[in-house]
Image (cartoon, rainbow, N blue to C red):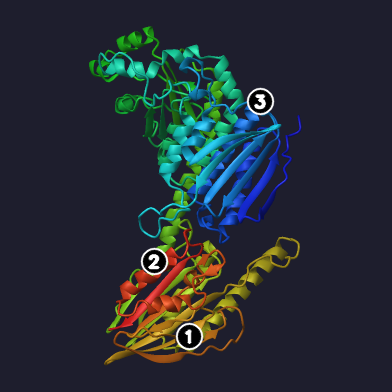
Amino acid sequence: MRAIPTQRETTSCASDVRGRTRVEATLSGSPLAPGSARAMLRKALTEWAQSSADGADLLTGRVGDDAALVASELVTNAVVHAGTDVHLTCRLEEDTGALVVEVADRHPSRAPRDDAAEAPAHDIPEYGRGLRLVAALAESWGVTYRAGSKTVWARLPTREEAPAGPPAAYAGERAPARDLRAAALLASDPLAPRGHDGPREGPRDGPRDAWRAASYGDDWLARRPGRDGAWLGRGALSFLAEASDLLAGQLDEDLVASLTGQLIVPRLADWCAVWLEDEATAHGGRPGTGGRLARVWHAGEHLVEELSRALERTPPPHSDDPLGTGPVPYPWPVHDAAAETGDTEGAEGAEGAEGAGAALAYRLVAGGRPLGTLVIGRGGIDRFPDEITGLVEDLGRRVALAIGAARQYARQATISAVLQRGLLPGAVAEIPGVRSALVHEPCDKGGPSGDFYDLFPAGHGRWCFAVGDVQGKGPEAAVVIGLVRPWLRLLAREGYRVADVLDRLNQLLLDDATEAADAAARALVAAGARPAAPGDGPQTRFLSLLYGELVPFEGGVRCTLASAGHPLPLLLDPEGGVRAVAQPQTLLGVVEDAGYTGETFEMYSGDSLLCVTDGVTERRSGSRQFDDGDGLARALAGCAGMEAGAIADRITQLVHEFDARPPADDMALLVLQAE
């Protein structure tokens, strides 16, 4: 076996005297270069995004995605057509707010290849999409020739008006529409005539002739095999790499199906379809069906509905080898008119006489589970070239992995949502003379939040509230919340004072951690395992908690509360004055016999109490935090005269607007306002 080629790279990141942040690398001219360029650029952009440079906050969002794709295409072009080492430079110009990507090679006599824009349609090789894609994504691009080298550069602006929408629509979130656009650029057929974006035209004597004209593509067979071999040999790796990037991280199986169609049509086939099987179908629950037809793509968009109806009548049959992913012949779809008259044999004969085309079906399998079927078709040929079938099989494996990952995420999200509903109160109590407003936003939609809240009656004219933040996230956090919330309610209803409730919760967490550690040690001894190393086994379960008790009286409400390692609550009066109404105390579950104390104050008409988790106070924008310089108190002061719900909405909005990227921590806040 030959040694795997390695990358020889030298990288530097710095800010030069003109205030430009830049990164440079020298990459060997091998197929690994595009992937290394993408990884290096994304790492650099992530680091720059933490800086205070103008425009840097957008670099991990849309601009960063475009820059990585542009760098990948320029490096691929240089590796394929120049064949020398490649020097990649990327710099952020703070004065103009532009991101510039430069790729230099040592073969200046070879111009950058953009054959699709120059050669006639019948003589264009199946590569050259790189510069067209660069031109579509960049503000401007060009070529600079120097003695012994050639540099292709692209300029991407970073200063843009943010799109209108709710605060949650962050620039850093990946939009499905952009993925579909990129997939369309990857799959666009460079063999189509210049300036022709639609399907190939032909005689239009009827729907059947239109379908034939768009599907058969008589020139497709004439292009084989030499030019296919050129693209498959040089561009297929880049195509698969970019396809993997597009499919990776997709959280919706239907979007994966859409991206698949965009990637295949028209480069590899005239049309394709994706069937998705649910669990019952995959295990034979609905024999004779191939699942639901999730997506159909055709080079002629006006023919998609007709093709869909034909494919619905002939779903993929169940295979004797349900885990086989290799291609198997698929019957050419029968036109509606032939199906309605029952003359399928005659229809097939007529189509066959004119070269109806070839169709293949690929099983989509991931983790030993059949997930669906991918079918491709190309008119005017008897069979697909082996190179095409192999490439689609490779792509199909990536599609299956993406579908499997999307389904796994959907299952986890469902479990998380059910678990989250069980960890939070189904409804909050209504307190006489007090308005309340709650906001709870988990950072990770795929796992239980570490933040929790509660507001409940404790009997004898008392109501209790809690806002907490558990160490960690996911199942471990859910265990602690499931332990704490019932104990809070039980102790409160037993009449314990605020300080006593925290004392007992602290001891409960310490005892629980000790018992868990003892059980783990016994299990290790019983199994004859090595002694646990420091840091192994169950860790201390601790949390920060703001817990209080409300007792309404005529004209106001008396509040007693305590903060155990939690951001201090703030009280807003009607005139806009803000003050903290608790003292910091130790986290729960850390120190034995910590000894907690409560503080009592009264709220009158218009007074508002704000309780938050550190997802609010520690919201970051570069090196700054939202609560730096009493930022939360200033924000609350600006809410004077607002009702509880409006205050909660305003604080939430300000926290989101503090940075262009989504929050990196869970967030919860509670507003209590005396009427």
Which mark, residue 109?
3
Q: Which residue is mark 1?
A: 562
Residue 469 in view, yes or no: yes
Q: Are marks 2 and 1 in contact (CB under 8 Å)?
A: no
Q: Is residue 5 left or right of residue 345?
A: right
Q: Residue at x 35, y 16 (%)?
A: 213
Q: Position of residue 103 (x, y in %)?
A: 63, 38
Label 3 SS: loop
Q: Earlier in the sequence, mark 3 or mark 1?
A: 3
Disc 3 from disc 2: Cα separation: 56 Å
Q: Nearer the viewer, mark 3 or mark 2?
A: 3
Which mark, residue 653?
2
Label 1 SS: strand
How crowded pointer 3 is (Cα within 10 Å; few <14, some 14-19, many 20+) is rated as few
Q: Earlier in the sequence, mark 3 or mark 2?
A: 3
Badge 2 amino acid: Gln
